[in-house]
Amino acid sequence: MEKGWKEVFMTTHDYKAEMAREILESEGIKTVVLNQQDTAYKVFGEYRVYVAEENETRAVELLKNLKL
Protein backbone atom coordinates (compact mmCIF):
# COMPACT_ATOMS: atom_id res chain seq x y z
CA MET A 1 0.00 0.00 0.00
CA GLU A 2 1.17 3.55 -0.67
CA LYS A 3 2.86 5.65 1.99
CA GLY A 4 0.45 7.54 4.22
CA TRP A 5 -2.14 4.72 4.49
CA LYS A 6 -2.64 2.46 7.51
CA GLU A 7 -4.32 -0.93 7.74
CA VAL A 8 -7.18 -0.79 10.22
CA PHE A 9 -9.03 -4.04 9.54
CA MET A 10 -8.34 -7.47 8.02
CA THR A 11 -10.75 -10.32 7.32
CA THR A 12 -11.14 -13.36 5.10
CA HIS A 13 -14.79 -12.47 4.42
CA ASP A 14 -15.72 -10.05 1.66
CA TYR A 15 -18.96 -9.02 3.37
CA LYS A 16 -17.10 -7.96 6.54
CA ALA A 17 -14.66 -5.87 4.50
CA GLU A 18 -17.65 -4.21 2.83
CA MET A 19 -19.27 -3.60 6.24
CA ALA A 20 -16.06 -1.97 7.48
CA ARG A 21 -15.88 0.22 4.37
CA GLU A 22 -19.50 1.31 4.78
CA ILE A 23 -19.05 2.14 8.49
CA LEU A 24 -15.97 4.25 7.81
CA GLU A 25 -17.30 6.03 4.75
CA SER A 26 -20.57 6.86 6.55
CA GLU A 27 -18.36 8.77 9.02
CA GLY A 28 -16.58 10.61 6.22
CA ILE A 29 -13.40 8.51 6.26
CA LYS A 30 -12.02 7.66 2.81
CA THR A 31 -11.35 3.93 2.65
CA VAL A 32 -9.47 1.55 0.38
CA VAL A 33 -10.21 -2.19 0.45
CA LEU A 34 -7.41 -4.36 -0.89
CA ASN A 35 -8.52 -7.81 -2.05
CA GLN A 36 -5.60 -10.21 -1.56
CA GLN A 37 -7.66 -13.34 -1.93
CA ASP A 38 -6.36 -16.04 -4.27
CA THR A 39 -8.43 -16.09 -7.46
CA ALA A 40 -8.15 -19.87 -7.92
CA TYR A 41 -8.60 -20.97 -4.31
CA LYS A 42 -10.97 -18.68 -2.41
CA VAL A 43 -9.92 -20.14 0.96
CA PHE A 44 -6.51 -18.42 0.77
CA GLY A 45 -5.94 -14.72 1.31
CA GLU A 46 -7.73 -11.85 2.93
CA TYR A 47 -9.29 -8.44 2.51
CA ARG A 48 -7.45 -5.52 4.08
CA VAL A 49 -9.04 -2.15 4.83
CA TYR A 50 -6.84 0.96 4.76
CA VAL A 51 -7.39 4.59 5.75
CA ALA A 52 -5.21 7.70 5.70
CA GLU A 53 -2.78 7.91 8.62
CA GLU A 54 -4.61 10.83 10.20
CA ASN A 55 -7.81 8.77 10.42
CA GLU A 56 -6.25 5.60 11.84
CA THR A 57 -7.20 6.06 15.52
CA ARG A 58 -10.78 7.06 14.75
CA ALA A 59 -11.20 4.21 12.24
CA VAL A 60 -9.93 1.59 14.69
CA GLU A 61 -12.36 2.90 17.31
CA LEU A 62 -15.29 2.74 14.86
CA LEU A 63 -14.42 -0.82 13.86
CA LYS A 64 -13.63 -2.25 17.30
CA ASN A 65 -16.96 -4.14 17.47
CA LEU A 66 -16.63 -5.66 14.00
CA LYS A 67 -15.03 -9.03 14.80
CA LEU A 68 -13.15 -11.29 12.39
Image (cartoon, grey):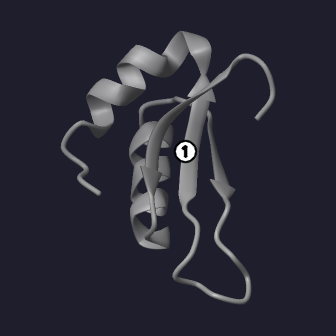
Q: Which amino acid, by three-letter code, is at mark 1?
A: Val
Q: Residue at x 56, y 10 (%)?
A: 54
On the image, the x and y values in percent for residue 39 come to 73, 82
Percent across and percent down for residue 45 are 58, 67
Question: Looking at the image, which residue sits at the far bottom?
Answer: 40
Quadrant including the C terminus: bottom left
Quick check: 2 above or below 11? above
Camera-side residue: 40 or 5? Answer: 40
As drawn, 39 above or below 35:
below
Residue at the right extreme of this rendering? 2
Assign a secondary structure to mark 1.
Answer: strand
Which quadrant holds the N terminus? top right
Q: Is residue 24 above or below residue 14?
A: above
The single residue placed furthest to the left in the displayed view is: 65
- Please rate how many residues cluster around mark 1, counting C-alpha atoms within 10 Å: few if below 14, some from 14 to 19, many from 20: many
Q: Nearer the viewer, residue 23 or 35?
A: 35
User: Does 8 appear above or below 42?
Assistant: above
Image quadrant where residue 30 sits: top right
Residue 23, image x and y in percent? 38, 45
Q: How many marks?
A: 1
Residue 65, image x and y in percent?
A: 18, 43
Horizontal side, residue 50 vs residue 20: left or right: right
Q: Which residue corresponds to the image point at 52% horizontal and 82% vertical from the top-left?
A: 43
Q: Residue at x 49, y 49 (%)?
A: 21
Q: Which residue is mark 1?
A: 49
